[in-house]
Amino acid sequence: TESAAASDSAASGSVFKIGGIGPTTGGAAVYGLAVQHGAEIAVEEINAAGGVNGYTFEVNGQDDENDTEKAINAYNTLKDWGMQILVGTTTSKPCIAVAAETANDNMFQITPSGSAVECVANDNVFRVCFADPDQGTASAKYIGEHKLATKVAIIYDSSTEYSSGLREAFVNEAANQGIEIVADEAFTADTNTDFSVQLDKAKDAGAELVFLPIYYQEASIILKQASDKEFAPIFFGCDGMDGILSVENFDKSLAEGLMLLTPFSTTEETSKAFTDAYVAAYGIEPNQFAADSYDAVYAVKAAIEQSGVTPDMSVSDICEAMKTAMTEITFDGLTGEGMTWSADGEPAKAPKAMKIVDGAYTAM
């Protein structure tokens, strides 16, 4: 519910109305709530500092329960409210469905965290996070450029698009980096409790590093089983690994030395102010989804400043101007410094690598 004053100010064109869509209930709520909260903190800060070109932001977050149909309903609810810009959606499948709607309406959309390639297929959609394959490429480059290993094994989940896409991109780039893939072992959602065969193959092949483009739940089991086998390569993961230190009953010492590419860590100096504000507001530390969303709102602000759009313009005119502006801005965010965007919606930023030292993330 919004105050009468707020709706009057919107009608007179003094406020930009930003919608958000994501799962704030259900199994993926940890992601959707983080995105909603990250956006809220950014909007509060921007408004407190005088807004953008003299206009303020109003944000309205809607729950889609990570369901495509509910995401479309949420989009229509936000359109009725008067949304001009969409910061969403949080998860990839709903994002692809909603992107078809924003394309029809020519509404500017920036997804903090929709990482599937198709999320930004339309020219009105941008994203803050890396696309799934880009993380695989970035991982191989990082391992190659820092000479971490030449013999690498991969253990991946062939039943998820996320893991398969990362693996494929990693394999393609490994060839350019002088990396030899000595074992390439799959598991599926039905076989994700016993990894002895995969680990034995990696160990017998002399792998110095094991690339795990998978989620942290399975990774925690792999680390335990590798330790039981006295197999101690470097383990290297991507953003799905983020959360391993919070697995219940997991011996954190097993993750010592684990490396991961993740866009955000609360231990970095640059994220201290945001982390403090987030904990004060919500009583929990922010995750990378919150940081992606915070950056998305600030990217919107930068694109509005660059393009000079005003809230009394049509949704389509705002979109046209901001599409161009996104390719002209450079922006230091929580998830990357000197971030830029190409016309195809993809961000360019240096990947950040973390290493777990003494049970905590440390920037590499």
Image (spheres, rainbow, N blue to C red):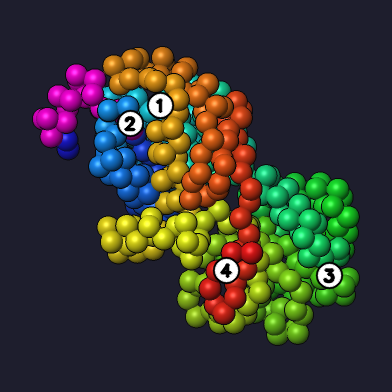
Q: Which numbered circle lies on residue 207?
A: 3
Badge 2 or badge 1: first in the primary sequence: 2
At numbered mark 2, what does the secondary structure look like: helix, strand or loop? loop
- The nearer-to-camera label among 4 and 3 is 4
Instruction: Name the residue beneath numbered marker 1.
Output: 304
Quadrant for the C terminus, please: bottom right
Q: Which residues are magenta?
A: 3-18
Quadrant for the N terminus, please: top left
Q: Is residue 92 left or right of residue 77?
A: right
Residue at 82 percent of width and 65 percent of height: 149
Residue at 37 percent of width and 49 percent of height: 38
In the rendered image, the residue lying farthest to the left is 4
Three-letter code, disc 4: Thr
Q: Is residue 225 left or right of residue 321?
A: right
Residue 3 visible in the displayed image: yes
Asked if the residues shown at circle 2 and circle 1 are in contact, with their CB atoms under 8 angstroms apart, the answer is yes
At numbered mark 1, what does the secondary structure look like: helix, strand or loop? helix
Instruction: Name the residue beneath numbered marker 2.
Output: 52
For the residue pair 321 and 114, the one nearer the viewer reads as 321
Instruction: Name the residue beneath numbered marker 4.
Output: 362
Badge 4 or badge 3: first in the primary sequence: 3
Three-letter code, disc 3: Ala
